[in-house]
Image (tube, grey):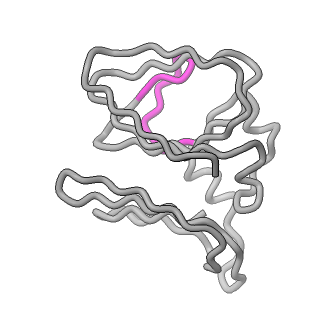
């Protein structure tokens, strides 16, 4: 993992041009946020791949987003998604998790990403190399994503 980043737009809509880059981002949208990725509406958690071209992002007023940035091939140890599929692309995170799931009963090393919401506070915690079983997503006040 390279960093965890937070975007909160309390002003007017913002257009951001991102030059080609070598990073993979896992993006979590908070409070019913959405954004445009190369004019494509994003409303669900995503995994954005390495880009060889400039990417145009538009964040409307009220956007609240948390991202986890990985070095190239940083997600390869716990997600089964090809670099070619991610190249210049964004994919629903749930789709990638479903494809990466191993049969239950076979533990694997993984990274946990916990996003907790308590009143107006949002907390993101990450830990590496924890043995778990098949990944799950639970929709409650505590969002647990096992990757």
Measured as percent of width and height from the top left, residue 119 is found at 17, 56
Measured as percent of width and height from the top left, residue 47 is found at 60, 42
Measured as percent of width and height from the top left, residue 107 is found at 69, 81
Left or right: where 16 falls relative to 143: right
Q: Pick whichever, 138 or 62, lies toward us.
A: 62
Range drawn in magenta = 35-46
Residue 82 within the segment the image draws in magenta: no
Residue drawn at x 28%, y 22% as measured from the top left: 61
Left or right: where 47 falls relative to 30: right
Measured as percent of width and height from the top left, residue 56 is found at 56, 16
User: Does residue 81 sit above or below 64 in this rendering?
Assistant: below
User: Does residue 20 sit above or below 114 in this rendering?
Assistant: above
Residue drawn at x 55%, y 67% as measured from the top left: 127
Left or right: where 72 falls relative to 110: right
User: Does residue 33 sit above or below 144 in this rendering?
Assistant: above
Specify the quadrant of the image occupied by residue 49: top right
Residue drawn at x 72%, y 26% as measured from the top left: 51
Specify the quadrant of the image occupied by residue 35: top left
Specify the quadrant of the image occupied by residue 63: top left
User: Does residue 53 sit above or below 132 in this rendering?
Assistant: above
Instruction: Report the quarter where the C terminus lies.
Output: bottom right
């Amino acid at each position: 993992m390279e960093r965890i980043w937070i975007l909160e737009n309390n002003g007017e809509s913002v257009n951001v041009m991102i030059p080609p880059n070598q990073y993979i981002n896992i993006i979590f949208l908070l409070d019913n946020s959405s954004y445009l990725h190369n004019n494509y509406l994003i409303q669900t958690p995503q995994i954005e791949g390495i880009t060889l071209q400039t990417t145009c992002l538009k964040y409307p007023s009220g956007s609240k987003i948390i991202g986890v940035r990985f070095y190239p091939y940083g997600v390869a140890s716990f997600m089964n998604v090809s670099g070619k599929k991610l190249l210049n692309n964004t994919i629903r995170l749930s789709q990638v998790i479903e494809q990466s799931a191993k049969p239950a009963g076979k533990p694997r090393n993984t990274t946990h990403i916990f996003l907790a919401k308590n009143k107006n506070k949002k907390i993101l915690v990450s830990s590496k190399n924890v043995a778990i079983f098949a990944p799950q997503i639970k929709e409650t006040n505590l969002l647990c994503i096992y990757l």
